[in-house]
Amino acid sequence: MILQALRPLTGRPLKSSLALVLLASTALASTVARAGNGDVHFHRGHLLLSRTVYDSKATAITPGITQLPPNCIAPNCVTATADGTYPTVFNNVLADGSFGITAKIVLDELRLDGDHVQSLEVPNSTERGVTANKDQMVTSFPSKSEIALNLSLDRSVVSFMGYLAPVGAVDVSNSNTPDVVDPTNPVPATIPA
């Protein structure tokens, strides 16, 4: 994800526009989405915090019935051990070592004293008008590799990584990379280019 603030690098006033560009990818697929120009402004000298919000329902996964990973083919299937309730949903990692479930991404702007300035929810499938297959980004909770914020050398762009998938999708992330498939990975799917 790329947040590009259109503002000067010197002490001049902040320009009145901000472009939010989402670059989401899973395997070889990617998409671009934009938040409206001018509706979000992050201020120089403030902290930017990324976080995820898990809000799936217990019914998202049925213990003893749901097969993991989704769309698996025997003998590569395991049975879920916990429902979708937080935090026990993550006990499914005991059965599926690559278990993850997608969740919303939120960016919080804080003053240096910790006071909250504003929050920006990254576009996702729970929002009106956002379709399940484009114009959104999620993280695969409890993964730790996504949503780490990276500031460009010229201090004008913040980037982070996520996935093009709807909120509540199971096992979106995996350890495979294009042309390098881990034979021990229970989530063998990749998305063709």
Image: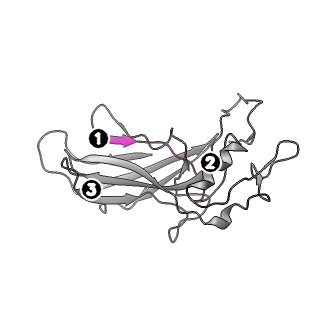
Q: Is residue 117 left or right of residue 102?
A: left
**Image height check: is 157 above or below 37?**
above
Image marks 3 and 1: residues in contact by CB distance under 8 Å: no
Q: Is residue 27 left or right of residue 41?
A: right
- 95 vs 47, nearest the viewer: 95
Q: In this picture, which residue range is highlighted in magenta?
A: 157-167
Amino acid at the residue labelled 2: Gly
Image marks 1 and 2: residues in contact by CB distance under 8 Å: no
Q: Is residue 190 left or right of residue 122?
A: right
Residue at image location 47% in from the left, 50% down from the top: 22
Residue 163: say if magenta.
yes
The label shown at residue 156 is 1
Q: Quadrant of residue 132?
A: bottom right
Q: Residue furthest bottom?
A: 128
Q: Which residue, given by chain and number where applicable, does mark 2 sit on?
A: 100
Q: Residue furthest left?
A: 11
Determine whether the residue tagged by mark 1 lies in a helix, strand or loop. loop
- 190 vs 8, nearest the viewer: 190
Q: How many marks?
A: 3
Q: Which residue, given by chain and number where applicable, does mark 3 sit on?
A: 41
